[in-house]
Amino acid sequence: KYLTMLDGDSKRLLATVNDILDLRKIEIESLSLARATVPFGRLVSRSLESLAVRAQHKGVALRVDPGEKGLFADCDPRRMERVFLNIAGNAVKFTPEGGSISVSVKRDVANQEGIRLEVRDTGIGIPRDALERVTERYFTVGSQPSGSGLGLAIVKEIVALHGGSIGIQSPLPGEENGTLVTVCLSGVAPP
């Protein structure tokens, strides 16, 4: 039991160190992307497989819809996996037992050449006064925040390096709670 806890803590510490190092590389413009043309929905599904176990253990329903076939992106798969894990990981962290998280990939309605990732949860949501700041480095919400405040800052930077955009809406329309995080990227033709 203690070894499992220690392993989890070590992985979280390593992730924080990697976030700090990547942010530094972004600052000095030395973070390079290893781009490849990949089926975007499959990348999302595979990236979130490990998170499904954590969601199930917490009693949160996690549904992933990879969308239609033929949606490809020219991206760095490893960096984009980090984007997916940070966003969906936050959803798991802030969604109480019995809640749900829906991850979907679709063609961007505003830009038919684009791809849209949506992560929607029924969690506690983000206070309106904090919504504009959640992608700032080291910003955390609440009096007992968990995490380093780097996850969404990294997401924002990686998505920007890919020429994309991120949007965050909370609470969900017509609801008191919940959050919707949207990532839009350019799509490419299949190889």
Image: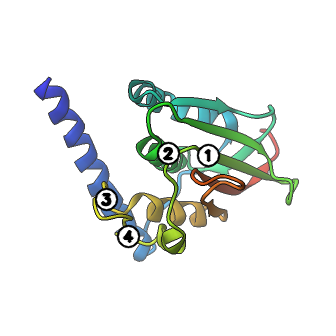
Is mark 1 in CB contact (under 8 Å) with mark 2? yes
**Callouts 4 and 2 close, C-beta under 8 Å:** no
Q: CA distance from mark 1 to mark 3?
A: 21 Å
Judge by depth and name the residue closer to the eye, 167 or 121: 121
Front in this rendered view, residue 24 or 89: 89
The residue carrying mark 2 is: 91
Mark 4 — residue? 139
Comes first in the chain, label 4 or label 3: 4
Look at label 1 and name its amino acid: Val
Residue 132 relative to residue 28: left or right: right
N-terminal label among 1 and 2: 2
Looking at the rendered image, the disc whose residue lies closer to the viewer, 1 or 3, is 3
For label 3, the residue is 145
Mark 1 burial class by Cα count in 10 Å: few <14, some 14-19, many 20+: many
Secondary element at image label 2? helix
Q: Please name the residue shown 80% across and 39% down the image.
A: 190
Residue 167, horizontal then vertical, whole percent: 64, 63
* Disc 1: which residue: 119
Kind of residue at disc 2: Ala
Left or right, 45 with reference to 130: right
Q: Earlier in the sequence, mark 4 or mark 2?
A: 2
